[in-house]
Image: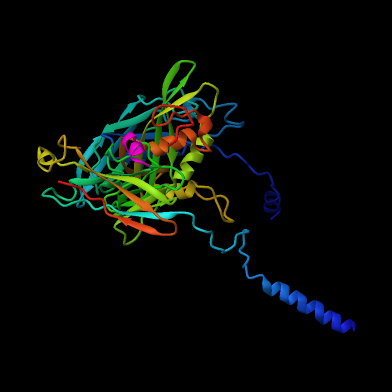
Amino acid sequence: MKKLSSIWILAVLVFLISCDKTPIIPGGGTDIPVAKIVGTLEIEFRVPGSFLGPSRVLRADLSIAKDAESLYKGHFLEMANVYNSKLMYQFDLAPGVYYYQAGIICVAEGDSCSAASFPGGKFGMKWAIGTVEVKQDATVHVIPQFTN
Amino acid sequence: MATGFLASCETAIEINSTNQDVPIVYCVLNSADSIQYVRIQKTYLIDQAALNNPPDQDSMLFTGQIVVSMERWSAGKVVETYQFTETNEIPKDSGFFPYQKNILYKAKIKVVANQVYRLYIYLGSKEKVLYAEASSLGRLNVIDPLPLQQRKISLYDGNNYTCRWDQVINAGVYQVSLRLKYKETLYGVTSLKYLDWPQPFASPGSDVDYLSIDISGARFMHILQDNLKSEDGLVREVVGIDFQIVSGSIEMKYYIESTSPSEGALMEKPVYGNINNGIGLFCSVARIDVKNLLLSPVTIDSMAYGQFTRKLGFLDHTLDRDSTNNF
């Protein structure tokens, strides 16, 4: 009888241990994926081609705001660090509609910038502004469009 | 035999031998400057703690004739020769410098890239010539940041900045340093202040187009919290941020490694030096300053209202302190 109860206890123990499917990670963490409560906005920031050389028109600004008024007033939610060498920029945002703006700047000498329709000549900027809806657990891809 | 036995019984140890007046020389050729400096001192010995009983100037500096000259070599030939003159135009830095005047030797030298420079120092009092050789660095080309104020820098939690530059010929070590500039107003008095944040040293990579270092936005906020004091009535306004990118020669890399804290069993490392007939360092650096960049509005608002920095008195990007602003 005593032997039977020992086997029974052992079986229960084995069952309980085997029920724990969560692997223990040193440091107290687990590898259980945390539910993603955000979506991803991916902006492909292309610099439009022109008769100016590629190093004469540069990325200058990439900002996200929650509405048009905030965008206009410069109250941004996120501002990316933009680089000449980086094309894709990602933002993790709560689901919803956002406004984005992308700015390019002309650094060419003389009247080249004016000729390329950059207002004010050298250091003149052009802007591409648009809206985008970010959905939970999804990546939305945007390519800002610059006019003229 | 008895004499030898008695002599060998001498157990007294002379702890402090007589001072040898060993020359100490430091010269860092700076390609960003048109004036180069050499500092010459000598070793000294005193019986008590130096801080309580600082040595007099004569025991730290050589007297008598001192001739400092430098040669620029190219393709195995001397191209230029420079003579240094004594100056005390640079004030003493803070720290333990127990002499009245900060005596240096200076010469007008515009450092040419990828050349060999030889330093000669004649010390009349010791009838000794010191000699050292170092190569100047190649051109330092910074890729990011560009000197564009329109391209604002974002440094906040979740947004890092990547600083990039091309590899420099003859360089052994690199360092990027950030300088945050801000106005501080207290009791109606406004002053311009700055906070320097040097980044860890970076080493040259192999087979890479460029070198880079990631500057953590979250760490930036902690640096502000740790280094700036909060006080009632204190108001701070962000002015801008400067980047300084420095590359040092291989000699400088060895020197930094030899003077950095030990991590292994070898607690006392010999300090690297390349001065013949003396101790010290002759090396070269190249430096680029990218000044007067602007921080992004999101960064400034994070400094004003973020959990680590909200008590530091920074104004937000609208120059307000109203935390109910719904940014």
Where residue B104 sits, quadrant-wise, is top left
Where residue B279 sits, quadrant-wise, is top left
Q: x%, y% of residue B122?
A: 34, 37
Q: x%, y% of residue A122?
A: 16, 37
Verify whether residue A68 appears in magenta: yes
Q: How are the residues colored? A: rainbow
- The image quadrant where one finds the N terminus of chain B is bottom right
Q: x%, y% of residue A42?
A: 34, 55
In the foreground, B264 or B223? B223
Q: Is residue B136 visible?
A: no
Q: Residue at x 35, y 39 (%)?
A: B243
In the foreground, A38 or A87? A38
Q: x%, y% of residue B79?
A: 19, 44
In the foreground, B220 or B235? B235
- The image quadrant where one finds the C terminus of chain B is top left
Q: Residue furthest top?
A: B188
Highlighted magenta segment, given as a residue range: A67-74
Q: Residue at x 63, y 42 (%)?
A: B14
Q: Is residue B176 visible?
A: yes
Magenta stretch: dominant secondary structure:
helix
Q: Is residue B231 left or right of residue B13?
A: left
Does residue A45 sit above or below B295 in this rendering? below
Q: Residue furthest right?
A: A1
Verify whether residue B264 appears in magenta: no
Q: Residue at x 33, y 27 (%)?
A: B86
